[in-house]
Image (tube, helix red, strand yellow):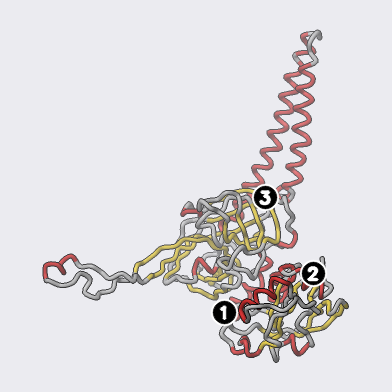
Amino acid sequence: MKQHSMKLVMIVVLALLVAAPSLMFASGRAEKTTGQSVAQASAAPAGDTTAMAEATKNLATIQYSFREVAQKVLPVVVEVDVTEKSQSNQQAVNPFDWFFNQQPGNNRSSPPRIQQGLGSGIIVQKSGTTYYVLTNNHVVDSATTISVQLYDQTKFDKVKVVGTDSRRDLAVISFTSTENLPVADLGDSGELQVGDLVLAVGNPFGFENTVTMGIVSALGRSSPSSDVAMNTDYIQTDAAINQGNSGGALVNIKGEVVGINTWIAAPTGGSIGLGFAIPINNAKKAISDFINKGKVEYGWLGVQITDPASDPGVAKDLKIENVKGAMLLNVYKGQPSEKAGLLPGDFITNVNGQDIANSNKLTQVVGDLLADKAYDFQLIRNGEKMKLSIKLAVRPDENSDALSYKNLWPGLRVVHINEQVRQRRCRKETTTCPPALMAS
C-alpha cells in the first residue's frame, strides 16, 4: 500500500492545517477590500480558488486512501450463510382430519423448521488448498449446513467447522479452493487508542460487502450480561454494525484486522453507534488452537474469584482499599493454585507483567497464557505484597470432576458482617436477636 494510506491521520491533520486556515485567510482578505482598488479586490477570489483547489487535493488523497483500504480488505471478508433445524412443539394439523372424524393433530409432531442465518467471516490462514475463516461462535454453533460467499460472488457449499468456543464467542470454519485467494493481515489491537479511525466490513442484513467508517470510541469494555461472551474485553466503535456484521472485520487505516465485530447495544435492533468487537489479539491464539488442536486451550489457575468492590468492608479488612485486582474466594484442590500456595483472601494485582484491573481481567490474562509454563504472580496477602511463580495447567472441560464443588477449599465465602446481614440471619433462625457483635 502507498505510504500516504499508511499515514491517513497525518493527512487529515495536514488537510485541515493547509485548507482551513487558507480559506479563513482568503475570506479575511475579501472583507478588507472596501475602499481599495478594483484590482486589489479582484485578487481575493483568486486566493479562494487556490485554497479550494488545495483543500480538494488533500480530500482526494484521503478518499483514495480509504479506497485502497477497502480494496485490500473486501476480498478477505466473506459472507457466511447457515441453515439450522428447530423442532416445533406444536402438533401438525391436517385439514382432512375433520373429514375422517379424527382429532386434529392426531399426535403428529410438526416437522422441523429450517431457519436461515447470516453472518460474516475473515479469511485468516491458508494451508495448501484449505482456507480458514474466523467468525463468531454464535454465527455457526447451531448450524446444520454452512456456505461462504466471496467478494466476487464465488460460493462454496462444503464448509466444515474446525472448532468453536463459546467462552470468547469465536469459531473457525474452512473450505477448499484451488484459486489463490488473499488472506487478511492481522494487526496489533494492543496499539489501538481511543480516537483511531477504523472501518467495519461485513454483510449487514444481507447487503454484502458493506464498509462503514468510525472511530475507536472506547477500549477494554466488558460484557454487559451472560448473553455476551465474558472471557474477553471489547473494542467499542461508532462504525455502523448491524445484524449480519457478526464475525466481520474491524480494520485500521493500514487495512489490518484489529477486531472481530460481535455485538451491538441497540434497543431498536439497529445500529445507534454502539458496536463492539473482540480485539484480534484475543483471537490469535484461538486461531492457532482451532487449526492445530480443534479446540481452544486456556491457561488454568484453579481458583474462584470475585471483585471486593461489591463489599467495601472486605476490602478494608484485607487492606486492599483503592487497589485494583481480583480476590480469591476458593482454590481447587490439586490444581496449580493450591500447589503454588495460594490462599483464599489473596488479592492478585499482576500476572506476567500485566496489571489486573478486576476478576474478568484475571480470567482473560490467565486464559491467554500457555499451560505447563510458570509465570510470575504479584499479590497482596494480609496487607503484605508477595510474588509467586505458578505453573499453569490446561483448563478442564466444564463437566470435569476437577471443577466439582467437592474439590473447593475452603468451600465457603467470607463476607464482612454488618447489621443487615446479622438481622437477616437471625430472622431465619430465631424470633429475637442478641445485641450486635463486633466483627473481627
**Res 178 label:** none
Query: At label 1, which amino acid type do we have?
Result: Gly
Please indicate, yes or no, whether residue 76 appears anywhere in the rendered image: no
Callout in the foreground (1, 2): 2
Q: Which of marks 2 and 3 is nearer the N terminus?
A: 3
The residue singled out by tag 1 in the image is: 294
Tell me the distance, in whole angstroms, between the alpha carbons under discs 1 and 2.
31 Å
In this view, the residue in front, 99 or 353, is 99
**Regarding mark 3 in the picture, which secondary structure is present there?**
strand
Up the image or down, 138 lies above or below 21; here it is below
Residue at the bottom extreme, as displayed: 334
Query: At label 3, which amino acid type do we have?
Result: Ile
The residue singled out by tag 2 in the image is: 355
Q: Where is residue 268 in the image (x, y as percent from the top left)?
A: 51, 51
Tell me the distance, in whole angstroms, between the alpha carbons under discs 2 and 3.
26 Å
Q: Quadrant of residue 39?
A: top right
Q: Where is residue 174 in the image (x, y as percent from the top left)?
A: 52, 71
